[in-house]
Image (spheres, rainbow, N blue to C red):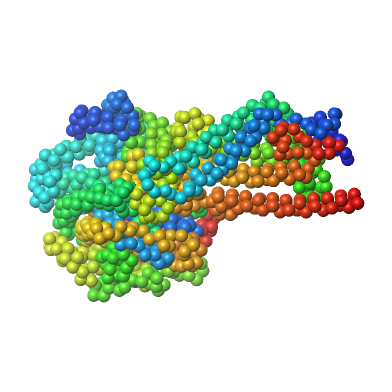
């Protein structure tokens, strides 16, 4: 088999795509990333000169929602991603080979493209029971993950599992599942959280990597700024109702039928960084709030352990007491207020006695 | 033990050298700051509470109302005044008199200070018959001021600033100043919760502060409430 | 061990060469399979092992029951939504909550959308490569391919030029040397029977289906906000309806309803003109490959689903059939009672869990799971590098559920066999028509091919039911009823102190049920028994083998090093491992202190 030295541009030209459509693709890509038209030329240049990149997509403890989301991508189509942009050399959900043949794919890419392939991780490794709560090819997933990461150029953490831990890491985390940055330390990691992440966000992260040959700009939590720098609330189409003080108070009430703000129903849009309200889901058809349900905050760390999804205020458990800030703070303030009243009463009695004594002394 | 000896031992003020009935303690900028700050806290607590638990929904067109917008505006405006006031207060701690510095430090290594704290606790538990005389804050009040006011104010400015930076966005000056602090909390829900809990700590502080100020006005040997208005601390028994 | 006979009538012999397939790919989650083949390379023993465990139900303990759907939905992102639906049904069953008629229609639309989408993606993207040789497609004649395509379907994308372009793209892709997903596939394997033209047509449809599946789930996005993992609500559905009133743009309005109708229409076309004709065309070349029947000719089970009217889960009101057939007696369909402690019981003798002393099996309401990862004495390799499992001991993270002691198969084939046995025309007629078209007798149904065909028939059935419920929703709205949620029992203060409930559904892969125990407004215990737990179950104490293992037996392999036949049969079940390896312990705290040997 020939060494794949050809570039992304070579590949798509060879596959019968015209230069015109190629340029169109580049400008659409630039637009979808919120970049100006001058970037279209840069993307085109990058694609004409950079070789295709092998991608190994590994699965730990997960539910495969990230893969399912990925194949929903409308632009680019996932067909074009896997045939023309990257070489998806290993993905146990979609690959033809199984067993030894699948393992061989992993090994070959590791050897042949040492330091030049991308590792995409869906799900996370459990550490309890020597890692044997997730076994691939008879071995703990965590070991294989470490080995494959060691030779990777960079690592993509797909979804909330790989980024933060997600549902299997919710209290009490019986398998001790950990995000991948707790076991991979020496590689650049880009986190693409969400349960799952939005399809076009996933493919755009890949297109960015392929076209610019580097990780996109990341925020403090290593998420791509282009999609995770604003809260859902900041760009929510129901924001006007929030500012106006117009809220859904109960399911299917008049306010719900007019599409008012879901803040009081527990919406986590104000504390969730994701592109749901801008990119939206399934090729822009809707997003949770548009379809009447509050945001669960699924792109944020530990979102499972913040109390009911339908509560406005987070449930916290200081010293084993369970309640919201208002409940706990309110009781504490009431307690202190009560103590103050009692103290005042005792002070008054003491003072009265003292003045009696003084009166008596004067007598 | 005479109060004369006490004040000498505590080394507070100069009442023992020239006995007199009052001392000028709180300078005008500090007094102004105190009352503006107090007003800010009331406004911030009320609007903050309403942001977390909004008033009942109103029907009609969104463009006809701006209830949450107004509540949030008032909260942010008060927060700016609170924050800038705090900076001004720090400035005054540097240029003002020695009492202006008191709430910014705790004389942690001073034995006599902790002795004073123990004495005040005894006084509040009705174990000591007579409080001591202080020109500034008594040691217990000093401790409470530092932890329940100064530390909490910094905490609220940092958490509040970090939340405000969420709205102003990555790269804004608010983000550069406060964003790193917000990131320490992970999920922004934690940041909101801590800020909210901070509000309750300050509410508890206010309850105690107001009660003790009034009580001490009546029961201690020096003036309290009027001091923060006139700046003069009156000694009821002439400091003797 | 020499040959042994299992109580459910299979002969096992592990004396031959052992073949290990791990990972089994093109499934959800992590599965390992080991088989022994005799000198003629016929499978004589099969061992299937679920190799992941997440503990979702442990995590559910103490949570708000209204939140449970979101947790259980994350059991699986492939059959996304079906666990959520089952969960809200369990909670509503416990709290006796009635949902509005519109909510029932919308939920059915969501569930049917999943059935259609999941079956389509399974067939083309997880299963087709077991029947279709991608490399052979390079040798096809585009003209002949076009003729073949036009002879089986009116689907418009069938011109010689279309197939030529596609073949060219494929050729260049292969020539690049980077085969990506198709690398190391079993191309040229003798078990592939399709002519190059059929392969080329199937590859074209593999790519078309990859494009099209995105469209179907837009229905989830409209009613549930997103897909995967749309949103659900205890007491109804979260989307309010406001067809033409003030602020209608903020709710399900005429445009949204039109959108759904449009997607349904397009999906009907795709299933009728692409999926079903492809299935029949491919099946016609595999008529002599009727292995993999396993349990299907003996014991099958379905709980039923798709209630026509709201709040009635009795078999008469369910559009998908329910019942159990045992020992191949199609003349008698037993009723399933999920609350009856005598019927469904779970065993862990061969699973990596342990029960307290003296407990052999448990009903899901009392379910206990305490992980116990121990390998048998005959295991080859070490704890963290297993070369060969010992099936005489514990060997899987999947439990072994049994219905009155019987191992049963669940899934589309089970549903269609039950519908057929109950003489329901909706099920019997398509089955008979399909068999007639392929010129096969009824027993041919009990095979890998039968399982794959039943899935296609069900997909077609489901897409028309989608249309039925969309029309029903529109009619109900037109009659003036726009209610979508019942909030009478939304507040936990309105709930009884201690209640139990069970919810069930037919997931794409088979019968699914959740059992919930609500105490003081919180989840006291939660248990899910899912389709792949039934199908992928290890042995029980009596030695009964599960559906995966049974189906693999007696299948001849052309080359044991190239396990195409194993993949083909396993994939016909559409395994979902993240689903099956669920557990619940009585005391969640214990789970964190797992003893590491």
Left or right placement of residue A188 versus residue C563 in this view: right
Q: Is residue B189 above or below residue C366?
A: above
Q: Quadrant of residue B228?
A: top right
Left or right placement of residue A147 versus residue B118 in this view: left
Residue ranking furthest to the bottom: C332
Q: Nearer the viewer, residue C491 or A194?
A: C491
User: In this orientation, does residue A291 appear?
Assistant: no
Q: Quadrant of residue C308?
A: bottom left
Q: Is residue B117 above or below residue C502?
A: above
At 68% across and 39% down in the image, what residue appears? B145
Left or right placement of residue B18 versus residue C496 in this view: right
Residue B82, given in percent of the width and then of the height, sits at: 58, 34
At 35% across and 48% down in the image, what residue appears? A259
Residue ranking furthest to the front: A363
Residue A28, given in percent of the width and then of the height, sits at: 27, 32
Q: How many marks?
A: 0
At 24% across and 45% down in the image, what residue appears? C210
Residue C277, given in percent of the width and then of the height, sits at: 15, 54
Left or right placement of residue C143 versus residue C446 in this view: left
Residue C135, given in percent of the width and then of the height, sits at: 20, 43
Q: Quadrant of the C terminus of chain B?
A: top right
User: In this orientation, does residue B92 appear?
Assistant: yes
Q: Is residue A31 above or below residue C357?
A: above
At 28% across and 68% down in the image, what residue appears? C317
Q: Quadrant of the N terminus of chain B?
A: top right
Q: Nearer the viewer, residue B214 or C554?
A: B214
């Amino acid at each position: 088999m020939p060494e794949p030295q050809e570039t992304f541009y070579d590949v798509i030209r060879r596959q019968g795509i015209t230069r015109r459509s190629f340029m169109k693709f580049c400008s659409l890509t630039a637009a979808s990333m919120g970049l100006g038209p001058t970037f279209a030329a840069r993307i085109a240049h990058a694609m004409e000169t950079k070789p295709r990149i092998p991608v190994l997509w590994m699965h730990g403890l997960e539910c495969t929602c990230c893969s399912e989301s990925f194949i929903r991508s409308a632009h680019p189509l996932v067909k074009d991603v896997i045939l023309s942009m990257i070489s998806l050399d290993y993905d146990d959900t979609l690959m033809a080979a199984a067993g030894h043949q699948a393992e061989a794919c992993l090994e070959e890419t590791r050897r042949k493209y040492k330091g030049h392939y991308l590792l995409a991780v869906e799900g996370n490794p459990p550490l309890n029971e020597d890692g044997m709560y997730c076994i691939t090819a008879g071995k703990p997933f965590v070991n294989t993950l470490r080995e494959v990461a060691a030779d990777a150029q960079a690592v993509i953490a797909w979804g909330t599992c790989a980024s933060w831990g997600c549902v299997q890491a919710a209290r009490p985390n019986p398998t001790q599942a950990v995000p991948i940055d707790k076991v991979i330390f020496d590689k650049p990691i880009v986190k693409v959280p969400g349960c799952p992440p939005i399809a076009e966000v996933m493919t755009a992260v890949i297109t960015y990597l392929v076209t610019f040959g580097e990780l996109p700009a990341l925020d403090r939590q290593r998420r791509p700024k282009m999609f995770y720098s604003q809260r859902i609330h900041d760009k929510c189409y129901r924001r006007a109702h929030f500012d106006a003080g117009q809220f859904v108070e109960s399911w299917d009430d008049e306010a719900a039928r007019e599409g008012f703000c879901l803040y009081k129903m527990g919406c986590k849009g104000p504390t969730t960084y994701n592109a749901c309200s801008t990119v939206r889901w399934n090729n822009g058809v809707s997003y949770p709030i548009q379809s009447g349900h509050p945001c669960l905050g699924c792109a944020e760390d530990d979102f499972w352990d913040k109390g009911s999804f339908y509560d406005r205020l987070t449930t916290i458990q200081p010293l084993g007491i369970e309640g919201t800030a208002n409940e706990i703070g309110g009781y504490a303030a009431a307690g202190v207020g009560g103590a103050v009243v009692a103290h005042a009463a005792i002070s008054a009695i003491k003072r009265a006695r003292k003045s009696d004594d003084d009166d008596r002394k004067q007598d | 033990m005479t109060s004369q000896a006490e004040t000498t031992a505590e080394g507070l003020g100069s009442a023992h050298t020239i006995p007199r009935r009052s001392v000028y303690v709180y300078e005008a900028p500090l007094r102004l700051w105190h009352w503006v700050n107090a007003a800010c806290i009331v406004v911030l607590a009320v609007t903050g509470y309403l942001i977390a638990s909004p008033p009942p929904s109103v029907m009609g067109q969104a463009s006809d109302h701006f209830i949450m917008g107004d509540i949030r505006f008032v909260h942010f405006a008060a927060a700016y005044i609170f924050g800038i006031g705090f900076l001004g207060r720090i400035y005054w701690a540097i240029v003002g008199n020695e009492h202006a510095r008191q709430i910014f430090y705790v004389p942690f290594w001073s034995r006599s200070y902790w002795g004073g704290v123990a004495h005040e606790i005894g006084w509040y538990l009705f174990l000591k018959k007579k409080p001591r005389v202080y020109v500034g804050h008594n040691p217990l009040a000093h401790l409470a001021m530092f932890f329940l006011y100064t530390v909490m104010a910094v905490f609220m400015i940092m958490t509040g600033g970090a939340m405000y930076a969420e709205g102003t966005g990555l790269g804004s000056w608010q983000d550069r100043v406060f964003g790193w602090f917000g990131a320490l909390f992970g999920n922004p829900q934690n940041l909101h919760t801590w800020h909210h809990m901070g509000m309750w700590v300050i509410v508890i502080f206010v309850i105690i502060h107001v009660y003790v100020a009034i009580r001490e006005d009546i029961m201690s040997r020096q003036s309290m409430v009027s001091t923060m208005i006139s700046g003069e601390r009156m000694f009821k028994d002439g400091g003797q | 061990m020499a040959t042994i006979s299992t109580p459910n009538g299979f002969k096992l012999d592990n004396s031959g060469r052992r073949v290990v397939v791990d990972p089994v790919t093109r499934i959800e989650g992590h599965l390992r399979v080991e088989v022994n083949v005799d000198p003629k390379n016929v499978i004589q023993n099969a061992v299937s092992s679920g190799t992941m465990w997440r503990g979702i139900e442990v995590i559910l303990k103490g949570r708000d029951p209204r939140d449970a759907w979101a947790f259980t939905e994350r059991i699986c992102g492939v059959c996304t939504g079906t666990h959520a639906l089952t969960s809200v049904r369990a909670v509503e069953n416990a709290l006796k909550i009635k949902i509005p008629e519109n909510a029932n229609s919308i939920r059915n639309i969501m569930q049917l959308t999943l059935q259609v989408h999941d079956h389509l993606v399974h067939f083309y993207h997880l299963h087709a490569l077991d029947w279709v040789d991608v490399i052979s497609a390079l040798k096809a004649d585009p003209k002949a391919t076009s003729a073949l395509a036009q002879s089986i379907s009116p689907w418009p994308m069938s011109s010689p030029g279309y197939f030529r372009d596609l073949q060219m793209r494929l050729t260049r892709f292969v020539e690049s040397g980077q085969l990506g997903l198709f690398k190391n596939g079993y191309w040229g394997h003798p078990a592939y029977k399709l002519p190059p033209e059929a392969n080329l047509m199937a590859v074209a449809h593999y790519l078309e289906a990859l494009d099209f599946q995105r469209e179907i789930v837009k229905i989830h996005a409209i009613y549930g906000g997103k897909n995967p993992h749309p949103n659900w609500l205890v007491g109804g559905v979260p989307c309010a309806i406001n067809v033409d009133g003030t602020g209608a743009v903020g709710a399900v309005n005429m445009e949204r309803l039109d959108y759904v109708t449009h997607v349904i229409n397009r999906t009907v076309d795709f299933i009728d003109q692409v999926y079903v004709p492809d299935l029949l065309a491919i099946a016609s070349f595999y008529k002599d490959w009727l292995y993999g029947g396993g349990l299907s000719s003996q014991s099958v089970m379905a709980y039923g689903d798709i209630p026509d009217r709201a709040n009635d889960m009795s078999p008469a009101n369910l559009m998908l059939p329910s019942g159990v057939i045992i020992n191949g007696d199609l003349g008698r369909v037993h009723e399933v009672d999920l609350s009856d402690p005598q019927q469904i019981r779970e065993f862990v003798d061969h699973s990596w869990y342990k029960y307290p002393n003296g407990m052999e099996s448990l009903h899901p309401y009392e379910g206990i799971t305490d992980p116990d990862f121990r390998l048998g004495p005959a295991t080859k390799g070490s704890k963290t590098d297993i070369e060969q499992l010992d099936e005489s001991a514990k060997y899987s993270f999947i439990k072994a559920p049994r219905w009155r002691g019987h191992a049963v198969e669940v899934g589309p084939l089970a549903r269609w066999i039950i519908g057929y046995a109950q003489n329901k025309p909706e099920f019997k007629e398509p089955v008979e028509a399909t068999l007639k078209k392929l010129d096969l007798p009824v027993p041919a149904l009990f095979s890998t091919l039968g399982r794959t065909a039943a899935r296609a028939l069900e997909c077609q059935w489901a897409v028309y039911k989608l249309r039925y419920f969309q029309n029903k929703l529109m009619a109900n709205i037109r009659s003036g009823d726009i209610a979508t949620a019942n909030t009478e029992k939304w507040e936990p203060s309105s709930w009884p102190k201690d209640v139990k409930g069970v919810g069930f559904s037919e997931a794409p892969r088979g019968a699914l049920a959740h059992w919930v125990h609500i105490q003081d407004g919180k989840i006291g215990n939660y248990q899910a028994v899912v389709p792949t737990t039934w199908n992928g179950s290890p042995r029980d104490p009596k030695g009964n083998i599960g559906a995966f293992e049974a189906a693999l037996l007696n299948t001849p392999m052309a080359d044991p090093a190239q396990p195409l036949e194993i993949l083909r049969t396993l994939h016909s079940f559409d395994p979902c491992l993240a689903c099956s390896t669920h557990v619940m312990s009585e005391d969640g705290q214990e789970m964190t202190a797992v003893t590491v040997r």
